[in-house]
Image (cartoon, rainbow, N blue to C red):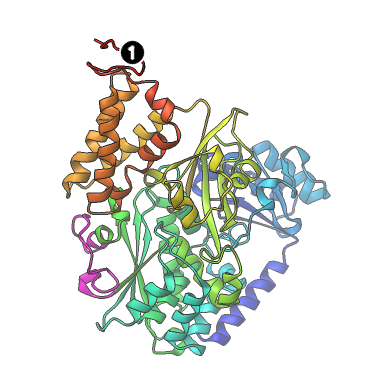
Amino acid sequence: MTLEELRELAEKEQERQTTFKHRILYCSSAGCVSSGSDAVKETLKKALEEKGLTKDCEVLGTGCLGLCGEGPLVFVQTDDTLYQHVDADAAKRIVEEHIAQGKKVKENMIEESNPFFASQVKIVLENLGRINAESIDEYIGIGGYEALAKVVTEMAPDEVVEEVRKSGLRGRGGAGYPTGLKWAIVRKGANAQKYVVCNADEGDPGAFMDRSVLEGDPHRILEGMAIAGYAVGANQGYIYIRAEYPLAIERLRLAIKQAEKNGLLGNRIFESNFNFRIDLRIGAGAFVCGEETALLRSVMGRRGRPKPRPPYPSEKGLWDAPTLINNVETFANIVPIVNRGSAWFAAIGTPKSAGTKVFALAGKIKNTGLIEVPMGIPLRKIIFDIGGGTSDGTEFKAAQTGGPSGGCIPTEHLDPPVDYESLATVGSIMGSGGMIVMDSTSSMVDVAKYFMEFCVDESCGKCIPCRVGTKHIYGLLDKISKGEATTDDYALLKELCQMVKETSLCGLGQSAPNPVLSTMRFFTDEYTSLLKQPVGYVPAGTKETVA
């Protein structure tokens, strides 16, 4: 495909859409599908047929619309109306009243002023709700693959790397490593064969950011990977995705097939000398395979276990060749950076944490769902304005960011900006974007125990600190939760957490103690209230020995 043909296809798709008076988009992401959106689709189509409106209206599936807890969701694109809790009856009324008569169905309508949407800035999620998730034509119709055409036909690879560097984009997989710097290292690699890998192994409990992007906008990821391949000198890409994401896998396979058919992946892309292919690698769901060295071993068909670094994958990765690894959200930012410029992106967020961050809100929060906010927004604003506060009106206790690797942040630390550095000061991390809210009914000891149990199960067992240490930490937490632990056990728990954190081989073990340490730091009373005193313990101000 040439650039001219790409633009002709875009115009053709835009003209096709103008033939419809109404475009009705129903959420076809996993969350809404599980709550009945496929049945809603059939009801909408049947109602349009009965009203003789089939030729005037188009019904199509789109990506996640955000308010996952209020699904199934339906969006009438013509006048930007979003409906929640759409069952068969509501779907029929949307057609009979809104589409046929121009009267909105107030009972199911979400107001535009809803605070859930007011503070969001959508870059990564901008196409979710706008296009058919399974159509390359619709993606091209909104400017898709223009960024790839621009870099291949107008820019040198070093210029692309520099543009990403100047944007200030940092890896959205958790560590926050500067993306442009990583690209530059791979670009300079001496090996003729290089690889680009997309880490879609999203394993944090309560996290569904990457899954939603892949389900709703797969071509954005393919295009971002192809741009990365051109920039670093790679001709092969892999998307490593866990088998628990069947819908995302299905749509990725379709998107790859569509892109290849249109000449947007494969040989001589835009009639240049640039060749790039993308293949999927399906993981079995091991949390440790989110760690880059374990992921690469799994891609190569080996057991997913981490190995010491250096050398880093950017120097010796897949089959000992320089390998670029970024996660889904990082690649999703590449296209808008190329299209709108690094200065535009760098102006969003904070000086050290540019751009936006996608979070999955879960737990004891009113508005469960997917959000995208500027870096630097206070956590308090996310939880109480966007999230609507706790689900049952109970008192807020803590929010955990970063999944099993993150810390629990109490009320008094909700005002500092959400960025990599600020979260680290309170013992947490950005992580990939999971955010779980806990209220006054939550036991923080049980929360720490839950996440430690997860880490015990997911440890690959290669290094002793993680394999043995996490199990002992879990045992101490279990002992405390049952009221069987002493103050000596409590002291041992803290010491053991620090040892595991400092001596584990990879990020799983190094960060596994974070939920324990942060809850011990901010919710000490919840631990000490469950302790019994050890034999020989002398309480302050007494001379008697406690037997």
Residue name at image x 38 percent, y 78 percent? 184
Residue shown at 25% from the left, 18% from the top: 534
Q: Is residue 252 above or below residue 243?
A: below
Which of these two is toward me, 73 or 399?
399
Give the overall secondary structure of the magenta segment.
loop
- Helix, strand or loop at mark 1: loop
Q: Residues within 10 Å of mark 1 (few under 14, many from 20)?
A: few
Location of the C terminus (image quadrant): top left
Q: Is residue 547 above or below residue 41?
A: above
Residue 512, x across and y down, in percent: 32, 44
Asked which quadrant contains residue 273, the reply is bottom left
Q: 253 or 438, which lies in front?
A: 438
Q: State the extent of the magenta-drawn residues as a range.
A: 296-322
State the count of labels. Answer: 1
Type of the residue with mark 1: Thr
Residue 324 in the image: state x and y as whole percent: 34, 71
Vertical comparison of 65 with 278: above or below: above
Image spot of residue 354 (x, y percent): 54, 65
Residue 235 position, x and y percent, is 33, 79
Pointer 1 residue: 542
Q: Is residue 115 left or right of residue 292?
A: right
Vertical placement of residue 163 versus 490, above or below: below
Asked if residue 461 lies left or right of residue 527, the reply is: left
Magenta residue check for 297: yes
Along the viewing direction, whichever of 532 and 8 lies nearer the viewer: 532
Image quadrant of residue 523?
Answer: top left
**Residue at figure coordinates x 59%, y 27% from the top left:** 394
For image coordinates 56% across by 45% down, the residue present is 369
Is residue 206 highlighted in magenta? no
Would residue 348 be visible to someone looking at this image? Answer: yes
